[in-house]
Amino acid sequence: MLDEIKPHLAELRDRVIKIFLILLVLFFACFTVWEPILEWVAQPLKDALSAESEVIAYKMGEQFITAVLVSFFAAFIIGLPFVFYQVWAFVAPGLYSNEKKLIIPFVLFGTIMFVLGALFAYYIVFPYGFTYLVNFGSGTVQAMISIGEYLGFFLKLMVGFGVSFELPVVCFFLAKMDLITERSLIDFFKYAIVIIFIFASLLTPPDIVTQFLMAIPLITLYGFSIIIVKIVNPYKEEPEF
């Protein structure tokens, strides 16, 4: 058993190393322009702050850590096609020849959907969520937001929405592999609703508006996935004997 697993572990190691190296190169490139990247990242927060509030760094080295994180985030987004390619290359040996040809759609639509999810968070969710959170109780307490805490919150939501928007892509390929049908997704729908709201509550601030801003698109994507799966691998009733 161990001898059978070793080649797969070696292959996984090689793929991870390749991903690490390309992201490292992209990181150093992005680090040279980290300030405009951070300006874009911090813009939703600045738009939500009042004139009396400001973004601060209160820990030693927080500015440097912030620069590193935003550079790595930018490198990850730029390197997404390569990451998806390496993921596909790792699982490809276990696929049929006709499934291996789906590498370009997987890389293309995987990247597009992740970016769409991140942009949805940035332009739709953040303006409402940050405005509510920052200005809540502003008559009593003046907001002084740490850039480090904000960045951690920002990255969690961006990655969370990006991963969430991969649902139609994942369902498409599972359907192509004959692992799911629209019937299985429909039967699982009531459980999916609960899971989606739990997922949204874990990633978003503790207010109902932001949670719905994440949950509703996910439910919509689930419905869209059902349509995709119905086209790709429609349910076939078992013949009666």
Image: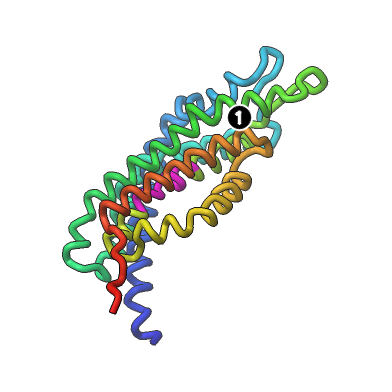
Percent x, y for residue 90?
A: 31, 64
Placement of the C terminus among the 4 image quadrants: bottom left
- Which residue, given by chain and number where applicable, does mark 1 sit on? 129
User: In this picture, is 177 found above or below 147?
Assistant: below
Of the pair 187 and 158, the residue shown nearer to us:
187
| Residue at (61% x, 21% y) in the render | 48
Where does the magenta region start and end? 161-170
Q: Where on the picture, by quarter, is residue 51?
A: top right
User: In this picture, is 135 found above or below 92?
Assistant: above
Q: Amino acid at mark 1?
A: Gly
Of the pair 24 and 98, the residue shown nearer to us:
98
Residue positioned most to the top: 51
Placement of the N terminus among the 4 image quadrants: bottom left
Q: Where on the picture, by quarter, is residue 186?
A: bottom left
Of the pair 230 and 160, the residue shown nearer to us:
230
| Residue at (27% x, 45% y) in the render | 108
User: In this picture, is 216 found above or below 196?
Assistant: above
Percent x, y for residue 159?
A: 49, 44
| Residue at (32% x, 69% y) in the render | 11
- Colour scheme: rainbow
